[in-house]
Amino acid sequence: MWLVYAAFANKLGANPAEALVRATGDWTLRALCLVLAVTPLRVVTQTPALARFRRMLGLFVYFYVVVHLLSYSWFDMNFDLADITKDIAKRPFILVGFSAFVLLTPLAATSFNRAIKALGAKLWQWLHKLVYIVAGLGILHFFWMRAGKNNFSEVFAYASVLLVLLGWRVLEFRRKKRVNRPEN
């Protein structure tokens, strides 16, 4: 809502298009961090009810990535599909960001109960593990975008948060594997 207000009130600075593209990208990463924080927080605090928020937060990630892509397509490229396609092919950080969007799309499309039943729980869970690849692509997109300005402090902050959240999952997977290992 703040971005909509700021756009109409002319409070987005000298380059409003860049401000919108950047803000929506930042919110995409923030929402992605929140989604990935749900499971560790749920396990550590022993609060199973937190799992109910994961789907909603995941849809926020998709919402923000769609608005991010629309902001880029509209304000930077004037919805010129040929120019967008050339830009994706020419600039690796846009290709990586677009790839993350493409991988998020089936996650958003299968985020309802009927999709879980139709796919089956195992396939649905496997599909939704793509979020880990999306997280890596999101950080790479942000890193390459910032490389031109040689400004990496925010990139390292998000990367650190995601590294902790993904590292927790690796440690938890190993712990469960050790606990479930049959004794000889």
Image (cartoon, rainbow, N blue to C red):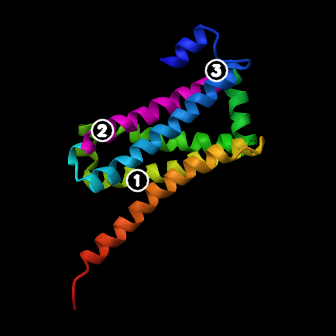
> Residue under circle 2?
53
Q: Quadrant of residue 98?
A: top right
The span from disc 3 to disc 2 (Cα, nearest Å) is: 31 Å
Tell me residue 61's x, y (percent): 45, 36
Instruction: Describe the element under mark 3 as helix, strand or loop.
Output: helix
Q: What residue do we see at 33% from left, 50% from top?
A: 41
Answer with mark 3 or mark 2, whichever residue precedes in sequence.
2
Magenta range is 50-74
The span from disc 1 to disc 2 (Cα, nearest Å) is: 17 Å
Q: Residues within 10 Å of mark 3 (few under 14, many from 20)?
A: some
The amino acid at mark 3 is Trp
> Residue under circle 3?
74
| Residue closer to the observer: 123 or 96 | 96
> Is residue 57 highlighted in magenta?
yes
Q: Is residue 126 above or below residue 62?
A: below
| Residue closer to the observer: 153 or 124 | 153
Looking at the image, is mark 3 or mark 2 nearer the viewer? 2
| Residue closer to the observer: 71 or 162 | 162
The answer to whether marks 1 and 2 mark residues whose Cβ atoms lie closer than 8 Å is no
Q: Residues within 10 Å of mark 2 (few under 14, many from 20)?
A: few
Answer with mark 3 or mark 1, whichever residue precedes in sequence.
3
Q: Which mark is residue 129?
A: 1
Tell me residue 139's x, y (percent): 59, 48
Instruction: Describe the element under mark 2 as helix, strand or loop.
Output: helix
The span from disc 3 to disc 1 (Cα, nearest Å) is: 31 Å
Q: What residue do we see at 25% from left, 51% from top?
A: 120
Q: Is residue 30 above or below residue 124?
A: above
> Is residue 120 highlighted in magenta?
no
Farthest residue, direction top: 9
Tell me residue 117's x, y (percent): 22, 44
The amino acid at mark 1 is Lys
